[in-house]
Each structure stands twice: as structure tokens, then as C-alpha cells.
Image (cartoon, rainbow, N blue to C red):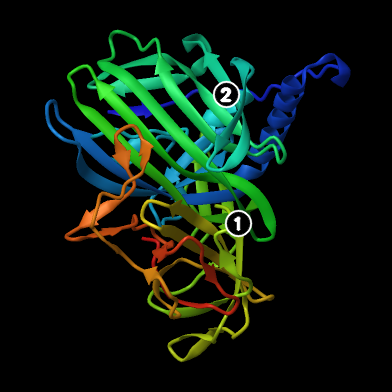
Amino acid sequence: MRIGRLVLFAFLAPGLAAAQDLPPEVLLLARVKARLREALAKLPDYACLETIQRFHKRPGQQLEPLDTIRLEVLYAGGSEFYGSPGGRRFGEENPSAFIASGAIENGAFALHLKTVFLNGHAVIRYSGEEDLAGRRTARYDYVISPVFSGYQIESDGSSGVAGMKGSAWVDPQSLDMRRLEVRAYEIPPTVPVEDVASVVNYAPMQIGGASLVLPQSGSLALRKASGEEDRNLLEFTQCRAFRAESTIRFGEAPETGESVVEGRGATAVRAEAGRLLPAGIPVTVALAAPVNERLFVGAVLEGRTAEAVVSRGEILISQGAAVRGRVRRLEHHAEGDYFAVGVEFTEIDTGAATFRFYADLRSVDPLPGFEWTLPESKTVTREVGPGVRIWSTNGSTVSLPDLPGVGSFFIRGDRFELPKGFKTVWRTLSPK
């Protein structure tokens, strides 16, 4: 069973009236649309690794883990393209091509935003200001008729187009998207699905000197008429830049190590902007500035290689090279008096070359209150989607989700600081 949207839409420029004639929330919406149009124009230069943890519930039973899927996703030509991690070909416009069964969805990377805000078919209403994860946001509710949504649902051999409705939360100062919720309505009676709801959370990040907002996490909840339910957790990590080439090629991919995007009969060639380090190499990173509880998810992390990076006796990266990344998770759990922290480094810049940094965190400098896992003295959970929790349990301990390229840990106390010079040791991974 799959949820997909395979209809292309045109960008429609909103009409703007004189500022003095429009209420502030209407002007804000116009500015948000302009910001999104600019962001989506840049998005084809970036790809991310999407990790999907899938859960399934049979009628009358409990929700159980099904599997974990990892795909690379790229937005180009108004469509989302998917490929296998480490592969050089983005040739599928629906992730269902990579699974045998179960629920999966496209649209979370870019298409949902495009459909809601840029296609001109949504009825959007301002719903006031709301606090979202401690930050002030403006909320907009929307509805899109099945005639214009292109929101296709497929299940058990049947398919049909449903309408879309939900809410979006935006930062009124930066105009950045923070969260988008999508729910299907008027699902065709021929499709044996009763409810579909998805959430995408966005966060700012910096790649190669460019600042942009990309999807960070999300969830999908689906309930079938039979009583079966599916839940997916989505995480977008290892987002990286691509350098667009002007060449459009037909047929087979080149043998030069370039990545390709296949779509509508043409193959658009793109070369990766950063070299990938060999797997299994230790890399020690020293923070260039403190990290503490006053930062926010998406805040830029900067560091330096604390020692040379060596492979087979050859120095690949000298000591002191710039390392960049972001705060991936920063949650204060007052009931347990601890923080859940996630950090992600994505690139190393030597000045002469840029390397893609894809690695697992192996060790850190001694720090009071630091814990890789927490004792399971009580239930420690947080809902990120209907019926889905982010924590996993292992025996008598509780741990954070294992995401590729993300270092996750706990720090006890009501505040913390990783000081300047704090060292973390990583081991590089293969993306395959």
C-alpha cells in the first residue's frame, strides 16, 4: 500500500495588494509564500538521507515495529526523486518502488509545501499565534478540494484522489516554515482507508555557507477500514549540496562518478559538491564554540579537526580544518531532570576541498551528567505522531533513536554546556 502524489503543479505568483489595504495576517501569508517560492527554487541543489521507521498494528493487537527503510531523496523539476543510499541514480518518483508491502508516502520533502502554498488551489485561513516548542509561530489552516489536491491514496489494489486539509506553523520573523500537518478528507469509498494524517517538522541548517530550511522529522499515521493501522517515523539527516551541471543527457548514466536524476525521458546530471571519506576512519572534532541549553534545533555547529585525518598512511585532511553541522535534537525533560541532545556534522572544509562528513559518534570528552542511555526507572516517551513514540527500550535502559550520522546522548541536570574545545570522536560510515 502506498500514498503518493504523481501530479505536477505549476507555480502561481500571488497577487499583492497595497499594504495599507490588507490585514497583517494576509501580508504575512504573502511574504511566507514568496519565501517558500525562493526556498523551493534552491532546493534542487540539495539532497537528504530519509530514514523511515515503520510500525504496523493488526486488528485488536498492539503496534509493533515492522522495519526501517533508508532512501536518498532529491527535489528536482517539480518532483521528488528517490534512490538507494550511496547510489548515484535518483530514478524513482515514488518510494513505494523500494518496498514490498506496508505504508509509505512521498511529498514530505517538498511537494506538500508546494501544493499547499504555491499551487493557488488552497483556501487558507489565519488562526492566530501559537507557541510551538517554545517559539512563537503564526498558524494557518487550509483546505484543498480533491479536484486540485493530486493527493493519491493506494491500498489493496484500489486507488483514488482525496482532498487535503490541515495546518501550517511559520516563524513570523524569519518567515521560515516550522511545521506542516496534512490530513486526507473525502477519501473515495472505493479505497479501503479510513484516515491518513502526516506531520513534517522543519529546521534551519547551513550547508556550504548557505542557510536554508529543510525537513527534519515527521510522521505518518494510516488507518484502514479493516482495523489495521500503520505508523511511520521520518527523519531527514545528512543533507548535502549538489552542484548543478548545465548538461541534460539521455539514456545511461555516465561512468565518471557523477550522480544523475532521471525524469520524463531526460537525465539531468549533477555532480556531488563534496568528496566522501573512506569508511572506518576516526575523526576527532573539537567544538569552535560552546553548545548549551540556550541554543535551538537547527543552530549551526562549528568545529575543527583536532588532529589530522589519515587513511592508509595518507593524510586526507590536516589538523584544524573547519567542520560544520547543526543541533539535531535539544529537548529538556523536567520530570526526569535531563536533556536529550543530538548533534550532526555534515561537512569538512579544508579550504581547498570540501568533504562530506558521514559518521557515527563513538566517544566524547568527560562531561558531568553525560549518559549514552538512561535507566528505565519510569516510562520516558514523547509522542511525535498519533500513537508513535520516539524512545526505544533495550532491556533496562532507554535510548534515543539510532539515526545515521547523528550523535545522540543524554545530559542530566537543568542546564548544561559542552565547552569550546570539547572533543567528540567519530568513525566514518559508508552510505550504502
| 97 versus 345 height, above or below | above
Task: Pinpoint residue 123: horizontal percent, then vertical percent.
Answer: 60, 13
> What residue sits 59% from the left and 85% below the top?
318
Report which residue position mark 2 lands on: 116
Q: Is residue 72 left or right of residue 112?
A: left
SS category of the residue bearing label 2: helix
Task: Specify whether residue 111 is in view.
Answer: yes
Residue 248 in sight here = no
Label 2 and label 1: CA atoms lie apart by 27 Å
Q: Quadrant of the N terminus?
A: top left
Which one is nearer the viewer's eye here, 73 or 394? 394
Is residue 136 or residue 196 the one in the foreground?
136
Q: Residue at x 35, y 23 (%)?
A: 196
The numbered dot on residue 324 is none
Quadrant of the frame with the C terminus: bottom left
Percent across and percent down for residue 261 are: 51, 45
Q: Position of residue 199 (x, y in %)?
A: 44, 33
Q: Residue at x 49, y 55 (%)?
A: 330
Q: Nearer the viewer, mark 2 or mark 1?
A: 1
Image coordinates of residue 68 in percent, x first then y, are 28, 48
Give the number of the disc on residue 299. Answer: 1
